[in-house]
Image: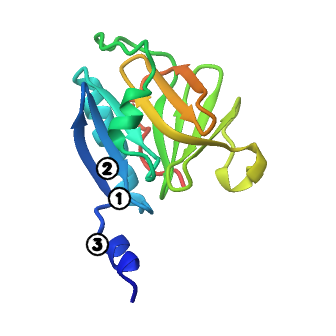
């Protein structure tokens, strides 16, 4: 067995640290259902207490470097009612952020995002329709994704686990 393979087997499914003013959550190389649920719950709990969370999806770039490239308009105001239904765990490595007029399906394992107007099973999305992403910044009002080209994609949505949402739907 190679050393790198051994390290992958021993890595934590999700790690949490602080960097600057953000809580950094980094998924391991492959998330199972429990680790995906833990990442969603930890992010929701941190956001509900007023923190900004960066979900580091770029294993080749140090988290501090990604934090430095974070969106400029980060806010930490009290969360009021936000439209949409929060975030749902769809299955191992997959989450859906539900907004009033759109949805983001996020594949945490393959570090990519798909925007749609209606819920679409991620297994039926063509490879070319996904947008590669490097990081997500989540606060009480917005979710911002940094794509592979350095462009910020932002939506007004709350990363919250609403009643009846957040459970696995797959």
Q: Which is more toward the observer, 76 or 84?
A: 76
Expressed as whole percent of the image width and height from the top left, the position of residue 106 reads 55, 43
Q: Which residue is mark 2?
A: 38
Q: Secondary structure at mark 1?
A: helix
Nearer the viewer's eye, disc 3 or disc 2?
3
Q: Secondary structure at mark 3?
A: helix
Q: Which residue is mark 3?
A: 10
Crowding at mark 3 (Cα within 10 Å: few <14, some 14-19, many 20+) = few
Q: Which residue is mark 1?
A: 34
- Distance, label 2 to label 1, CA atoms, is 6 Å
Residue at the image point whose x is 25% and y is 31% from the top? 46
Q: Quadrant of the C terminus?
A: bottom right
Question: On the picture, is 126 further left or further right than 145?
Answer: right
* Residue 163 seen in this snapshot: no
Crowding at mark 1 (Cα within 10 Å: few <14, some 14-19, many 20+) = some
Q: Are marks 3 and 2 in contact (CB under 8 Å)?
A: no
Residue at the image point whose x is 33% and y is 73% from the top? 7
Nearer the viewer's eye, disc 3 or disc 1?
3
* Quadrant of residue 42 within the rendered picture: top left
As drawn, which residue projects farthest toward the bottom? 1
* 32 is higher (above) or lower (below) than 115: below
Q: Quadrant of the N terminus?
A: bottom left
The numbered mark at residue 122 is: none
* 155 is higher (above) or lower (below) than 161: above
* Residue 15 seen in this snapshot: yes
- Distance, label 3 to label 2, CA atoms, is 18 Å
Q: Are marks 2 and 1 in contact (CB under 8 Å)?
A: yes
Expressed as whole percent of the image width and height from the top left, the position of residue 90 reads 52, 50
Question: On the picture, is 120 further left or further right than 34?
Answer: right
**Colouring chosen for the image of the structure:** rainbow
Instruction: Specify which label sits upstream in the sequence, 3 or 2.
Output: 3
Expressed as whole percent of the image width and height from the top left, the position of residue 156 reads 51, 17
């Amino acid at each position: 067995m190679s050393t790198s393979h051994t390290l992958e087997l021993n890595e934590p499914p999700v790690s949490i640290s602080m960097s600057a003013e953000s809580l950094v959550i980094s998924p391991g190389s492959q998330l199972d259902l429990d680790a995906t649920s833990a990442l969603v719950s930890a992010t929701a709990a941190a956001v509900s207490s007023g923190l900004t969370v960066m979900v580091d999806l770029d294993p080749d770039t140090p988290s501090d470097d990604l934090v430095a490239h974070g969106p400029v308009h980060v806010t930490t105001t009290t969360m009021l009612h936000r439209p949409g239904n929060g975030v749902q765990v769809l299955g191992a490595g997959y989450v859906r952020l539900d907004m009033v007029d759109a949805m983001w399906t996020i594949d945490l394992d393959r570090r990519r995002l798909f925007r749609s107007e209606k819920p679409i099973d991620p297994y039926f999305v063509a490879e070319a329709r996904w947008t590669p992403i490097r990081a997500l910044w989540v606060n009480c009002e917005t979710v911002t994704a940094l794509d592979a080209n350095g462009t910020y994609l932002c939506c007004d949505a709350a990363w919250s686990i609403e009643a009846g949402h957040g459970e696995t739907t797959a």
